[in-house]
Image: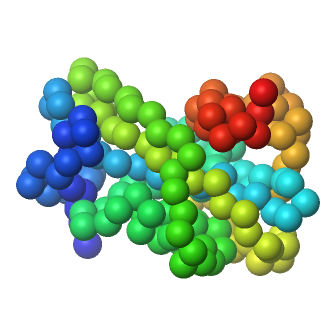
């Protein structure tokens, strides 16, 4: 089944256009929405996953869980769906707000999107994490210093944006 997305304007208003995500080419002023989840353990470590080696883009790189917002979803709906899908953890129904957002415009590739970061404080152990075949091949629970080192040794997708999100939240100076 094809995954459908709503197309939004710069102000996050739905344009009324719903299109297949695969092969979407967005024009100027058109955006899709994404979510990213900073998932923190009670002892302050963050969950990072290693992308499958079969991924077309960023194979083997480290990242935080997240994904595209489907048609009819809010970014909060999407983070509550994506986290269980990607890492098997449950996001409660308490109110959550995005801690940081950014916009990407790439007119040449039709890759325009707005990303909302959520910072989730979940009580879980490594045994609770369940990776999805084809999505991720490994995971780590890392301190911030370990994530910085991981980015030096390899690549952590969205690293600069993660820094900006944590700075906006007041976690990083």
Q: Position of residue 143 (x, y in %)?
A: 87, 46
Up the image or down, 140 lies above or below 94; here it is: above
Up the image or down, 38 lies above or below 101; here it is: below
State whether residue 124 appears in this view: yes
Give the colouring mode of the picture: rainbow
Q: Position of residue 67 (x, y in %)?
A: 46, 55
State whether residue 61 appears in this view: no
Q: Is residue 151 left or right of residue 88?
A: right
- Image quadrant holding the C terminus, namely top right
Q: How many marks?
A: 0
Which residue lies at the image location 77% right of the left edge and 77% below the top edge? 128
- Quadrant housing residue 105: top left
Up the image or down, 157 lies above or below 131; here it is: above
Which residue lies at the image location 66% right of the left edge and 61% below the top edge? 120
Which residue lies at the image location 63% right of the left edge and 34% below the top edge? 168
Q: Residue furthest left?
A: 16
Q: Is residue 168 left or right of residue 138?
A: left
- Quadrant housing residue 147: top right
Q: Position of residue 47 (x, y in %)?
A: 75, 56
Up the image or down, 22 lies above or below 88; here it is: above
Q: Nearer the viewer, residue 143 or 173?
A: 173
Which residue lies at the image location 78% right of the left edge and 53% below the top edge? 46
- Image quadrant holding the N terminus, namely bottom left
Q: Is residue 171 left or right of residue 44?
A: left
Q: Position of residue 109 (x, y in %)?
A: 27, 27
Q: Is residue 102 left or right of residue 66?
A: left
Q: Nearer the viewer, residue 14 or 6?
A: 14
């Amino acid at each position: 089944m094809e995954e459908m997305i709503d197309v939004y304007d710069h102000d996050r208003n739905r344009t009324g256009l719903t299109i297949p995500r695969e092969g979407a080419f967005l024009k100027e002023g058109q955006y899709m929405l994404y979510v990213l989840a900073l998932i923190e353990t009670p002892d302050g470590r963050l969950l990072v996953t290693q992308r499958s080696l079969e991924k077309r883009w960023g194979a083997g790189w480290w990242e935080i869980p997240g994904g595209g917002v489907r048609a009819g979803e809010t970014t909060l709906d999407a983070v509550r769906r994506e986290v269980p899908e990607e890492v098997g953890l449950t996001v409660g129904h308490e109110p959550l707000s995005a801690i940081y957002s950014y916009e990407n415009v790439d007119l040449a590739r039709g890759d325009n999107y707005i990303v909302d970061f959520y910072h989730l404080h979940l009580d879980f152990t490594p045994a609770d994490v369940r990776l999805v075949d084809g999505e991720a091949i490994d995971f780590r629970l890392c301190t911030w210093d370990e994530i910085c080192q991981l980015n030096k040794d390899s690549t952590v997708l969205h690293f600069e944006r993660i820094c900006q999100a944590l700075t906006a939240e007041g976690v990083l100076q």
